[in-house]
């Protein structure tokens, strides 16, 4: 990482000061990738400082509109949602678990809906286990194309890779598998599951 611990804390303070100045903002969601070494240590410092700031009156994050402060969410893959992450997020924190791009294949290699569904079940189970039934989480599912869940992928050289439907009432699809994965893991009955987050609503996505 190119920043040190002091820089991470200052960055968090400035972030809190900016967003807590808007009464419409009830919380912040962070998506900083990759969520791993060599960036992890300072990411955790940043999250912990930001969590503390969002629970403080110092930056007007606690006021009559938000007497318990503002929320803090972070997007990551299930394996990265460790106890250290939840500790840094604090009492108003939650994770947004990636329910897409769960393949190790290169970008542009589509997962079949069945492969996606199996990987999603595993990700949900890992998220529940890492959350230790005490930490809140949201599940992100693909509503638009991702690097492994797509209908068509056009490469820079013009080659078109055919994938599978995001949704179809005639054949298997990614969203149908997402619904099955939720049922298979009893996700809706989990007290700490906050709901679903749709990844993108668009007719065209680009990568990188």
Image (cartoon, helix red, strand yellow):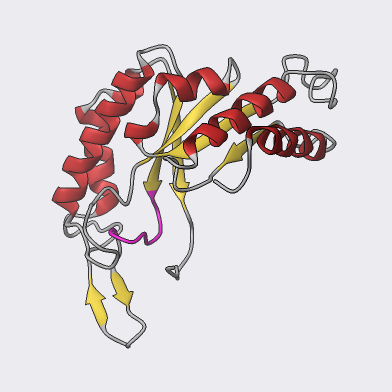
Residue farthest along the bottom direction in this orientation: 158
Q: Position of residue 126 (x, y in %)?
A: 27, 27
Q: Is residue 143 magenta?
A: yes
In the image, what residue occupies the spot 51% across and 26% down?
94
Instruction: Look at the magenta stretch and give its main secondary structure.
Output: loop
Pick the quarter of the image with the C terminus: bottom left
Q: Is residue 131 magenta?
A: no
User: Could you tell me which residue is drawn at 73 percent across and 20 percent down?
Assistant: 69
| Residue 169 drawn at (x, y percent) | 23, 56
> Could you tell me residue 56's position as x and y percent?
78, 18
88, 126: nearer the viewer = 88
What is the tally of numbered marks visible in this picture? 0
The relative height of residue 6 versus residue 109 in the rendered view (above or below) is: above
Quadrant of residue 179 within the rendered picture: top left
Q: Which of the 4 image quarters holds residue 64?
A: top right
166 relative position to 114: left or right: right
Of 152 and 158, the residue lying toward us = 158
The residue depicted at 60 percent of the width and 19 percent of the height is 92
On screen, residue 76 versus residue 147, left or right, reads right
Q: Please identify the quarter of the rendering in which residue 141 is found.
A: top left
| Residue 171 picture location, percent across and down | 16, 58
Left or right: where 59 falls relative to 32: right
In the image, the segment drawn in magenta is: 142-149
């Amino acid at each position: 990482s190119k920043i040190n611990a002091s820089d991470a804390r200052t960055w968090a303070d400035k972030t809190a000061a900016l967003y807590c100045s808007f009464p419409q903002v009830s919380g912040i969601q962070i998506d900083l990738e990759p969520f791993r070494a060599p960036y992890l240590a300072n990411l955790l410092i940043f999250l912990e400082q930001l969590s503390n700031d969002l629970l403080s009156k110092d930056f007007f994050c606690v006021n009559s509109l938000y007497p318990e402060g503002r929320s803090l969410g972070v997007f990551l893959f299930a394996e990265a949602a460790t106890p250290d992450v939840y500790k840094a997020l604090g009492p108003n924190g939650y994770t947004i678990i990636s329910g897409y791009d769960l393949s190790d294949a290169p970008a542009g290699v589509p997962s079949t809906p069945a492969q996606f569904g199996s990987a999603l079940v595993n990700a949900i189970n890992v998220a529940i286990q890492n959350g230790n039934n005490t930490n809140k989480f949201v599940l992100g599912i693909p509503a638009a194309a991702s690097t492994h869940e797509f209908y068509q992928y056009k490469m820079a050289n013009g080659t078109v890779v055919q994938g599978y439907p995001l949704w179809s009432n005639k054949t298997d699809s990614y969203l149908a598998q997402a619904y099955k994965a939720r049922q298979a893991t009893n996700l809706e009955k989990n007290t700490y599951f906050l709901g679903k987050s749709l990844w993108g609503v668009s007719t065209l996505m680009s990568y990188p």
